[in-house]
Image (cartoon, rainbow, N blue to C red):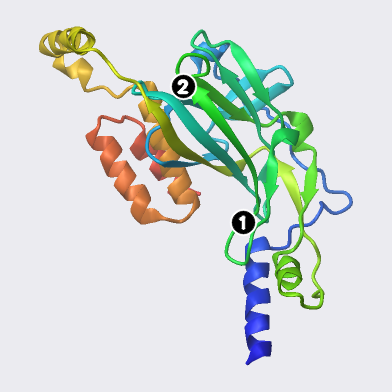
Amino acid sequence: MKIIKTTLVAFLAASLIGCAVSPTAGTTKDVVVTAPVCCNAYSEFSWVPMQGNQIDFAIDDYSQVGEFPEGKSYFAAFALPANVQRMQVDLKSWMRSTGVLAPKVILLNSNFEPVETIELNDFDVKMGGIFSLASYQYRVEMDQTTTPYMVVYSPQEYRKGEIQIPHPERLRAEDLGLARPMVIDPVIQHQKFGSLELGLKPLNLRSYRANEVAAAAAPLVQKATVNNAASAKMLPETEAFYNTQIKAAVGKNDMHKALQLLDEAKRAGSSSAESTFVELIKK
């Protein structure tokens, strides 16, 4: 029975890690981004509001492309919601058998000027387990006054690299004081695409005076009366948020969640969620 259990654990570990090895001789890793850039300035990016406790997202060929100091890269852009003053953000980039996005983060102020840069060597490497993936991880605090915007991307120099991590079964054996198993530590290739996660924890909410709320609400009521159709149109950042969430759900093969998000987005006035979902399931 012990042999069967050990074999099962090894099988599960292998299924999570997969055959993640360096490219074979003669194989060239595709790290170049040829898609056109979306914008000429940070202020033109589409921003996803950082709402809820967690955002699962993918940087893929549906993502925006920006021109950064190191060259072109696919990226994801996030903004603090108006009601949050300070937010603790845990960024994770998952290491899968297909590769990992080696992240670089830029924090911007309210004028869309970079004020802080987080390099790959600032990230911790969190080892996975039998039922969990390894990841690059970093915790940062964002502030509505100084750093309300965050951009995540991977420079071309990062995309050329790789990382070797201990096999989960070897770590398990070391923890239990067992003999080292005959397993190979996987080499995970850095890629231009990847699956990531934001863990969100508001630290301070942003309060308003009663007259500020009334002043902000009055124009909205008036605008809705004059042109109700215009108010029903979804904001670009909300549109991008729903599309990102739908892509992440489909990427995890969670069709139930993807359909729920699609229905919610359509009811909220999305014009692109349905086409995004259809294109994803065609692949």
Front disc: 2 or 1:
1
Give the residue at x 45% y 25%. 86
Query: Label 1: how many residues lie within 10 Å, few (<14), some (14-19) or many (20+)?
Result: some
User: Does residue 52 show up?
Assistant: yes
SS category of the residue bearing label 2: loop
User: Does residue 36 show up?
Assistant: no
Q: Report which quarter residue 73 is drawn in.
A: top right
Q: Nearer the viewer, residue 17 or 3?
A: 3
Q: In which quadrant will I find the N terminus?
A: bottom right
Give the residue at x 66% y 89%. 2
Task: In the rendered view, tell whether residue 73 sits above or below residue 126.
Answer: above
SS category of the residue bearing label 1: loop
Disc sitting over residue 155 in the figure: none
Q: Which residue appears farthest toward the bottom when viewing the image?
A: 1
Which amino acid type corresponds to the residue marked 2 in the rendered image? Answer: Ser
Residue 149 position, x and y percent, is: 51, 21
Q: Nearer the viewer, residue 218 or 72?
A: 218
Q: Are marks 2 and 1 in contact (CB under 8 Å)?
A: no
Query: Label 2: how many residues lie within 10 Å, few (<14), some (14-19) or many (20+)?
Result: many
Query: Cα distance, mark 2 to mark 1?
Result: 29 Å
Task: In the rendered view, tell whether residue 135 sits above or below residue 123.
Answer: below
| Residue at mark 2 | 46
| Residue at mark 1 | 133
Residue 67 position, x and y percent, is: 65, 18
Task: In the rendered view, tell whether residue 167 sits above or below residue 201.
Answer: below
